Amino acid sequence: MANERLKTNKKYPENWRLRKRGKKGEFAIWYRVAKSARHLWGNKTEVKLGSGKTPQIAEKKAFEFWALKITGSEKPYTLGALFTRYQTQVIPKKAKQTQKSNLQSMNRLRSVFDPNQPVVDFKSHQVFQYRDYVHHNLSAKRANLDLEVLSHMFSKAIEWGCEIRHPSKSIVGKIPIDDRDRYVTDDELDCLLEVCNALLKVYIPLKMATGKDKSMLLRIKLSDITKDGLHFLKREKTKGKKGGKASFLPFEFEGQSTGLKEIIDDIMIWRTRWLKVQCFYLFASSTGQPLVNEDGETSNFDSQWQRAMTKAINKTDLAEKFQERDLRAKTASDVESAEHAAKLLQHHSTATTNRVYRRKPEIVIPFQR
């Protein structure tokens, strides 16, 4: 038990302890105050930082309380102080999904680096060693995510008054990761449509027609549909940045139907049959709950997709699974030009479209003598 507790507490700042007390099993995080700092904490040896019904609630309250003790002018002299200030002041201002990823990176960083090491003594070779360690023991993606957090953390340290040379910026590069190249053929898509549920049968045609990512499709509201077409806002990833405009997909173009209205009509029929409680989102659960939450999580939809994919593997000629996001690449690959694909995907140039999303093998006429 002692080892388990120590392992659990490793992800917290030094001298933090997670405990469970009482019949109701309330979780609380306590801080064991060093003798030299007790005058700052009412001469107490231990202070309760936060409590709640779950460890996550206790953690949130503890970091909020801890943040109040950190003044804006205080330099983070040790790695532990730097980690804590970054976690309490910087990460909460990021997007929800980024916060989740950053906190996972923080847990890994805290488990490796000595919280008592002075920030000024931190060297580039430690970053190289950490990056390679995570790469070989976990994955290149996690190594790169941790490297981003570590680099930004030291940029903030310089901003907060630490007179140091940045240990990783322009020095430690990310590990190259090959772009995904899975192309879904028409036959493979037909296999999935043959066995998937009613939701996916109406969702997939809209996905193919628009090329939008999952979060955008699941956030469509009935008010986004007009008599002339379908409105999409600027993508979440490009808000506040250059490029990535909002888009409007019409039902008719130059007097001809684009086929989009027929797809929307099929979705409306599905809604009538499926929804027991009305909802202003186009896609929803039978009880009217949106299929994407405020944090951008889509667990309900993802479960339905996985069940459909397993069924397709077991009951059709589909030999290899593919991901929902591969359909976005299929649309980009199947349209005639990269310029058209970039507009559908709401890219401000064709560079990313060509590199990541245009996956269909290029037809090249062989040389003839």
Image (cartoon, rainbow, N blue to C red):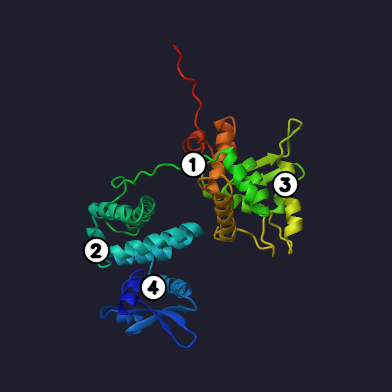
**Comparing labels 2 and 3, the label whose residue is closer to the camera:** 3
Q: Quadrant of the N terminus?
A: bottom left
Q: Give the mark, 3 or 1, whose residue is nearer the N terminus.
A: 1
Q: Is residue 317 left or right of residue 256?
A: left
Q: Is residue 359 left or right of residue 259?
A: left
Q: Which residue is mark 1?
A: 182
Instruction: Name the amino acid, label 4.
Output: Lys
Q: Nearer the viewer, residue 193 or 17?
A: 193
| Among the 4 quarters of the image, the one containing residue 86 | bottom left
Q: Residues within 10 Å of mark 4 (few under 14, many from 20)?
A: few
Q: In the rendering, at what x and y percent does residue 308 appear?
A: 59, 53
Q: Which residue is mark 4?
A: 69
Q: Which residue is mark 2?
A: 118
Which residue is depicted at the point 24% across and 63% down? 118
**Comparing labels 4 and 2, the label whose residue is closer to the camera:** 2
Q: Nearer the viewer, residue 279 or 57?
A: 279
Q: In the rendering, at what x and y percent does residue 55 appear?
A: 45, 74
Q: Is residue 245 visible?
A: no
Q: Give the mark, 1 or 4, whose residue is nearer the N terminus.
A: 4
| Among the 4 quarters of the image, the one containing residue 129 | bottom left
Q: Nearer the viewer, residue 300 or 86?
A: 300
Which residue is depicted at the point 43% across and 42% down? 179
